[in-house]
Amino acid sequence: MSLGDQFRTELNHQADARYAPPPDVQGLISGGRARRRRRNATRAGFGVAAVMLVLGGVYGVTQIAPAHTEPGPAAAATVMTLPSFQDTEFIPVRPSTYRMAVGADDKGARIEAELTVKGPGWLSGTQPVLSEAFRAGNPITAGVGVYQPMTLAGGSGCTGSWKGRSPGATPLAMARQLTRLPWSQVVRQPTLTRAFGHDALHLQLQINDHCPLDEYYRLAETHSGPRGISYADKPRLVDIDLWIVDVDGTTVVVDMWHHVDTPSAMLEAARLARSSIRFETLGLGSR
């Protein structure tokens, strides 16, 4: 059954998603990579801000035009030669095209993505984030992610009381789970679309990042590391778009998040980066 057939048959089961019941957050303990470290990195100007990193429920159909045409056999090898920023954190990333590790299919073949960033303000990490220029004290207010979830957030969503839930094996099953993330409200129900050259479901949430200062909201654990969306000193509302993508039978997620007061220029930079994403599945012996 195609993704479209699944969607038409089953989407109505989660059409009434609303706020998840608020958990008891008393006694949350500190854990994982703390938001305090992120805040301190921001206030310190990210440590090396002066050095540029040299790395060489209504059914509807929408379209997101991919930034590249579908690659032929010769184009697949280009991903392997691109630089990566995922082994560093909070280092300025210059405008260029980069390689990102995403996950693997059921045969063990690697899934990677090509992503292009433009303009100033991009910083490295497991997933790239945006800060207004590089001046010390400027907050991180937006980001883009591409990953294969291993577990999705349960409990409060905060690292101190985080509980993982196994993700659904299909885009539709995973979309249902994402509409029930802790402290989230569905802004747009999952909608069938064509994105990044593949069939996908697109949904929008608003998440109440209520986590204490020494914790952060972890949306998922992924093959490339935790997917966190907490960078502010105080609780903030985070708007996030998610695309659950069927990459040749493997379900992966693309997201774009931002604070509600993120400047429009930064939102456009994030949109351009998100729309540039192109997936590649690489055989076991291709590197």
Image (cartoon, grey):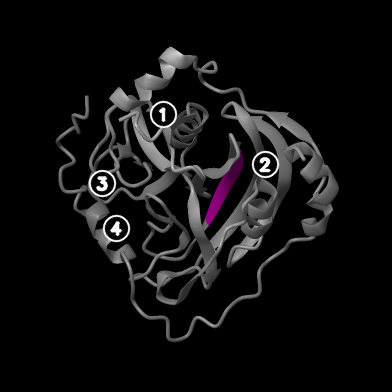
Q: Which is more toward the observer, 267 or 196? A: 196
The amino acid marked with disc number 2 is: Leu
Question: Any mark on residue 114, and which?
Answer: 1
Point out the tag, 1 or 4, that comes first from the N-terminus: 4
Query: How far is disc 2 from disc 3 in space, using C-alphas?
Result: 31 Å
Q: Which residues are magenta?
A: 238-245
Percent position (x, y) of residue 208? Answer: 55, 63
Question: Any mark on residue 201, and which?
Answer: 2
* SS class, disc 3: loop
Q: Which residue is mark 4?
A: 38
Q: Nearer the viewer, mark 1 or mark 4?
A: 1
Check the image and report above or below for 208 versus 162: above
Does residue 107 appear anywhere in the picture? yes
* SS class, disc 4: helix
The amino acid marked with disc number 4 is: Arg
Q: Which residue is mark 3?
A: 90
The amino acid marked with disc number 3 is: Phe
* SS class, disc 2: strand
Q: Residues within 10 Å of mark 3 (few under 14, many from 20)?
A: many
Check the image and report above or below for 66 versus 258: above
Point out the tag, 2 or 4, that comes first from the N-terminus: 4
Query: How far is disc 4 from disc 3 in space, using C-alphas?
Result: 9 Å
Q: Which is more toward the observer, 6 or 261? A: 6
